[in-house]
Image (spheres, rainbow, N blue to C red):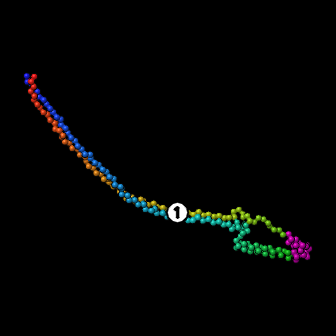
């Protein structure tokens, strides 16, 4: 007996894909820097300190006097001694004038002259506080005024380059179906 059979052959579709990647490049240019710092305005005024040391009294205490002081003291001392001498001579003259009243005026005057006393002591040590020190401190006035920074810096925009990728599809093999009728004898 003859039977007809149908044979079906199929072939699938085959796709081909090719792609090229996208490219992205970013460049950041340096910022344009423009900074200026003006100098600060500064004024300084000073008043110097004053130190005075007066040691005249210390030198006088040690008998190392300035020549003008020594002359002044010698003149005052000479005047005093002259007045004392004048007074002593006047007193002795009165004693001698009153010799008729009795007493031994010449012997008494000679005894007074024979008994002279002198002061002896250490004269080269200055007294406490004989050096006078006076100090007036100085003064410093500072007037400083800072100036602001002039900042004209500009940031540059980035340079962005983008090339998109590409995808291509193609049909490498088209799908197909084949039918065939075959007679078979059984």
Which residue reaches farthest left? Answer: 1
* In the depicted structure, whether residue 140 falls above or below residue 176: below
For the record, the magenta segment spans 95-115
Residue 154 located left or right of residue 58: left
Quadrant of res 63 = bottom right
Residue 162 located left or right of residue 59: left
In the image shown, does 165 or 77 lie closer to the viewer?
Answer: 165
Residue 75 located left or right of residue 154: right
**Quarter of the rendering occupied by the N terminus:** top left
Residue 129 image offset from top left, x and y in percent: 69, 62
The residue under the point 18% across, 40% down is 172
In the image shown, does 129 or 63 lie closer to the viewer?
Answer: 63
Labels in figure, total: 1
* In the depicted structure, whether residue 1 falls above or below residue 41: above
Residue 167 image offset from top left, x and y in percent: 23, 44
User: SS of the residue at dot 1?
Assistant: strand
In the image shown, does 89 or 111 lie closer to the viewer?
Answer: 111
**Quarter of the rendering occupied by the C terminus:** top left
The residue under the point 71% across, 62% down is 128
Q: Say few, some or many: other residues with alpha carbon within 10 Å of mark 1 (under 14 / 14 to 19 / 20 or more).
A: few
Q: Main secondary structure of the magenta part?
A: helix
Is 124 magenta? The answer is no
Q: What residue does disc 1 label?
A: 141
In the image shown, does 103 or 7 lie closer to the viewer?
Answer: 7
The residue under the point 13% across, 31% down is 8
Residue 22 image offset from top left, x and y in percent: 27, 47
Is 106 magenta? The answer is yes
The residue under the point 24% across, 44% down is 19
Residue 64 image offset from top left, x and y in percent: 72, 69
């Amino acid at each position: 007996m003859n039977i007809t059979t149908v044979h079906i052959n199929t072939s699938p579709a085959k796709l081909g894909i090719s792609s090229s990647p996208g490219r992205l490049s970013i460049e950041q240019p340096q910022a344009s820097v423009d900074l200026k710092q003006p100098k600060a305005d500064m004024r300084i005024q000073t008043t110097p300190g004053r130190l005075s040391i007066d040691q005249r009294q210390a030198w006088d205490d040690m008998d190392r006097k300035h020549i003008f002081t020594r002359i002044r003291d010698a003149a005052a001392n000479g005047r005093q001694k002259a007045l004392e001498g004048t007074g002593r001579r006047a007193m002795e003259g009165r004693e001698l004038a009153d010799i008729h009243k009795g007493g031994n005026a010449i012997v008494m005057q000679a005894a007074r002259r024979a008994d002279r006393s002198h002061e002896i002591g250490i004269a080269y040590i200055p007294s406490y506080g004989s050096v006078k020190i006076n100090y007036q401190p100085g003064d410093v006035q500072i007037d400083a005024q800072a100036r602001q920074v002039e900042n004209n810096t500009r940031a540059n925009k980035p340079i962005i380059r983008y090339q998109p990728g590409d995808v291509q599809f193609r049909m490498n093999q088209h799908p197909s179906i084949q039918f065939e009728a075959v007679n078979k004898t059984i």
